[in-house]
Image (tube, coloured by chain):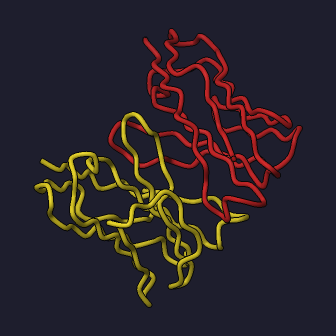
Amino acid sequence: DSGVTQTPKHLITATGQRVTLRCSPRSGDLSVYWYQQSLDQGLQFLIQYYNGEERAKGNILERFSAQQFPDLHSELNLSSLELGDSALYFCASSVGRGRDTEAFFGQGTRLTVV
Amino acid sequence: EDQVTQSPEALRLQEGESSSLNCSYTVSGLRGLFWYRQDPGKGPEFLFTLYSAGEEKEKERLKATLTKKESFLHITAPKPEDSATYLCAVLDYGGSQGNLIFGKGTKLSVKP
């Protein structure tokens, strides 16, 4: 158990809908990262937050957004969902900003868009 | 642009048959190279971090090494429970700002 908690574990929704994925980082970790993993693309970095502020952005679509709350948990919002958004979404956390510390991953949320 | 290439894509071994997985990388300045293990449907599990060429780290049957252009994950006398996808990731000084750039992984199957 990495100490990173993600909910829900599975999510099935229809195209055009909006969903929210939640992540609680390890105790004491200030950075939260979101990754998308699909079969053909591997793990793709979406966005990082550090202590409530956006720190880095990767290949995140405009339909997607995230935030980190004062209690350090994070939410990833996915809207106007398309079939191609079906993937595993992982959250990871680390103590620092990420430059010197390894990230620990949650078990992921499997999103299926039908 | 940072790039991470892992080979082979898939590897089948008999129990006890040692082998190595390769991770070659291109970064502007390596801050760290990370190895993770991922079981199907699960999140990546951290294994090792390597920071400089010549560094080696070991954990049970796994040993990771690093050169200026690549890293190897050596698996000695593997067991069926070592079956998983092994992911390599890099962190560089410049562009990635703290986020890991992952390779696509090597899927290892160890048969009894």
Position above or below: A56 against B2: below
At 40% across and 56% down in the image, what residue appears?
A90
* Quadrant assignment for the N terminus of chain A: bottom left
Q: Position of residue B80 (x, y in %)?
A: 45, 21
Q: Which chain is red?
A: B
Quadrant in which residue B17 is drawn: top right
Q: Colour of chain A?
A: yellow
A84 displayed left or right of A54: left
Q: Position of residue B44 (x, y in %)?
A: 48, 47
Please state which of residues B100 and B49 is positioned toward the viewer in this rendering. Answer: B100
At 56% across and 38% down in the image, what residue appears?
B87
Considering every residue shown, the one lying at the far right of the view is: B54
A20 displayed left or right of A71: left
At 61% across and 23% down in the image, what residue appears?
B7
Question: What number of labels is visible?
Answer: 0
Please state which of residues B47 and B92 is positioned toward the viewer in this rendering. Answer: B92
Please state which of residues B62 and A61 is positioned toward the viewer in this rendering. Answer: A61
Considering every residue shown, the one lying at the far front of the view is: A62
Position above or below: A108 against B20: below
B79 displayed left or right of B97: left
Quadrant in which residue A18 is drawn: bottom left
At 65% across and 73% down in the image, what residue appears?
A96
Please state which of residues A75 and A96 is positioned toward the viewer in this rendering. Answer: A75
Quadrant in which residue B74 is drawn: top right
A3 displayed left or right of A14: right
